Image (cartoon, rainbow, N blue to C red):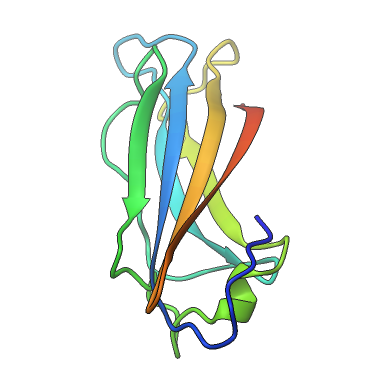
Amino acid sequence: FGFSIPSTDLVLGVEFNVYKYASHQQVASYVQDYNVLLLKGGSILGIEHKKTGAWPTSQNLFTYGANNDDWGIPGGILYSDCNTVNFGIAIRVELPSVRYDLQGYVEYVSATIYTSSTITTKAAAALMMML
C-alpha cells in the first residue's frame, strides 16, 4: 500500500476492508476463506483472520482486523512496515469440492492504519480472480 506513517507514530492496529464474491454456489460447491494473513515485507505472517462460510454471489464488504489488532506480529507492526509497497493482506481461498467453473473475486481492498496520533486509509482497486 505504501503508506507515509511518521516515524514518531506507534501502530496500534491494522484493518482491511475487502469487497469479494464468488461466481456462483451449489450444495458442497462454494468458495471460502482458507487463509487470511498479513503481508509484511513481502512475507505472509501473523495469526489467522479467515472468516467462516461461503463467499456471497454478489459483492459484499468483509472486514479483517481492527483498530487494536496487531495481527499477532511479534514486536508489533512498525511504521516502516506500513510504509513499504509490499505491505498488505494475503487471502488464500478454498474450494471444498473440485469445480473448475467456480471462481472467487476480490474487487477492492482498503487498508486503515490506526496509530498513536492518526488514522490513515489507503485503497487499492483491483479485480483479482482466484481459481
Q: Where is residue 58, by image quadrant? A: top left
Reply above or below: 30 against 88: above
Write the residue at 30% across / 43% down: 51
| Residue at left offset 44%, top offset 21% | 21
Which residue occupies the foreground of this view, 34 or 27? 34
Residue lying at 42% horizontally and 42% vertically, measured from the top left: 17
Task: Work out whether residue 50 can be spotted.
Answer: no
Q: Nearer the viewer, residue 26 or 15?
A: 15
Image vertical order of residue 73 relative to residue 68, above or below = below
* In the image, residue 77 above or below residue 97: below
Q: Residue at x 43, y 49 (%)?
A: 16
Residue 3 screen position, x and y as percent: 63, 62
Residue 96, located in which quarter of the rendered image? top left
Q: Tell how many labels.
A: 0
| Direction from residue 84 to residue 38 in the image, left or right | left
**Residue 69 point in image, percent of width and height:** 32, 68
Residue 2 visible? The answer is yes
Q: Quadrant of the N terminus?
A: bottom right
Quarter of the image where the C terminus is located: top right
Would residue 47 appear left or right of 27 to someone viewing this image? right
Q: Is residue 126 above or below residue 34?
A: above
State left or right for residue 98 relative to residue 4: left
Q: Where residue 67 sits in the image (x, y, percent)?
A: 30, 63
> Where is residue 13 shown, x and y percent of the image?
37, 69
Q: In the displayed image of the protein, which residue is found farthest to the front? A: 117
